[in-house]
Amino acid sequence: MKQQKFISGNEAVAEGVRLASPHVIAAYPITPQTVVVERLAEMVEDGSLKAEFMHVESEHSALSACMGASALGARTFTATSSQGLLYLVECLHYASGGRFPIVMMNANRSLALPWSIYGDHRDSLSQLDSGWIQIYVEDAQESLDMVLQSFAIAEHPDVLTPVMINLDGFVLTHTYELVEIPDKEAVSGWLPPFKTNYAMDFVHPKNMGFSSQPSDNTEFKYQQHRAVLDSISVIEEVDASFGTAFGRSYGGLVEAYRCTDADLVVVSLGSTTGTCRTVVDDLRTTGWKVGVLKIRFMRPFPVEAVLNAIGHVKGVAVIDRDISFGYEGTVFTNVNSALSRGQHNIVKLNFIAGLGGRDISKSTIRTIFTKLQQGVEGEPVKTVEFIDLTVDTDE
């Protein structure tokens, strides 16, 4: 029977992994991800999860182990964060190029230097070109549910692409919430065992992990690209199917809140969305026509979904917990590109916030809406602005 538990985002991920019944879990601890693999180790030890738990010597080894197991047709999971994600970057490309449907949780955390254990999105957004599907979740319930959906997406024969699930470090990974735990038998009925025609086989040998020549490399990369694009329809189908089976769905690639009649919209990733909704509701009571668009998937990027949701508005402000030094936030680059394909002239502003775990408050979001309104009215505003700076940068 399904039940409710008061658990953290990390523990919700572990519960989702348990329900998905992976064959192999490769683990290397790093703050703030460590609780995930600790809980999974406990589940394997007490017998509630039948899996091979591999405590390896590094993040690079963890993903390497998952690739080896996946090549044999095993369902695999690992987790990492920040500098650990960077340490395994080489393997990201091997995993996606090898079409291994691994699911990996990443606890978003800032990158050094300065050294920080607190959260922003600079780690995962730096890897958008690695060939992985990337998901950003808002709360613990979505974290659990997207673990299950991720295995269904990654293992779909039209996709066969690894998936990275991103949770905001500490704000989500260590915050406790009431989470509904689906029934194990119901999950087993919804998520079938992983089967692939591309596993290593002594009877029918296959060539895996091979080299290519200039004459055919582009064709392999094109197939990867098409698989990620094809995942768009699979993501929508899986989300709808999950909603039917368990009563929760998330709108597919994006989730729009009060955007239909909005003039001004804030775009966000992850846990910041909840605060944005609160501000939107408050401003609506005073006559502001505002909304918030949560982008759930950064890859594949939901171009059509973004245009359908906010292509009609007067102004869009993108909150980036990331900066591509010398240019702008990475989320803004992607949103701006999508909106440029529409026919409507929209004021688009980029606000860099929340770096190194700094709080993004309701006051900050109200300020963002105010500046966006000023831009729509034709007042001079910065296209890219570090919001809430405590030092004077106007030199």
Image (spheres, rainbow, N blue to C red):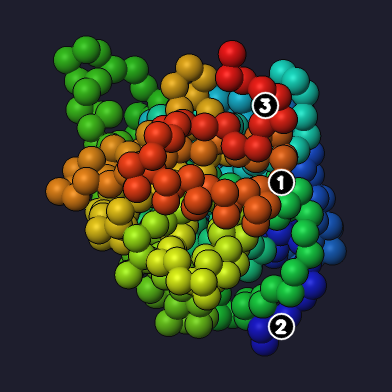
Residue at x 58% of width, y 63% of height = 279
**Looking at the image, is 241 positioned above or below residue 332?**
below
Q: Amino acid at mark 3?
A: Leu
* C-alpha distance separating marks 3 and 2: 37 Å
- Residue 224 lies, in percent from the top left, at 30, 36
Residue at x 40% of width, y 67% of height = 289
Q: Element under label 1?
A: loop
Q: Quadrant of residue 232?
A: bottom left
Residue tagged 1: 359
The image's mark for residue 3 is: 2
Nearest the eye: 357 or 190: 357
Judge from the rendering whether residue 226 lies leftward or rightward of residue 65; answer left or right: left
**Looking at the image, is 215 positioned above or below residue 102?**
above
Q: Earlier in the sequence, mark 1 or mark 3?
A: 3
* C-alpha distance separating marks 1 and 2: 32 Å
Residue tagged 3: 111
Single out the mark in the foreground, 1 or 3: 1
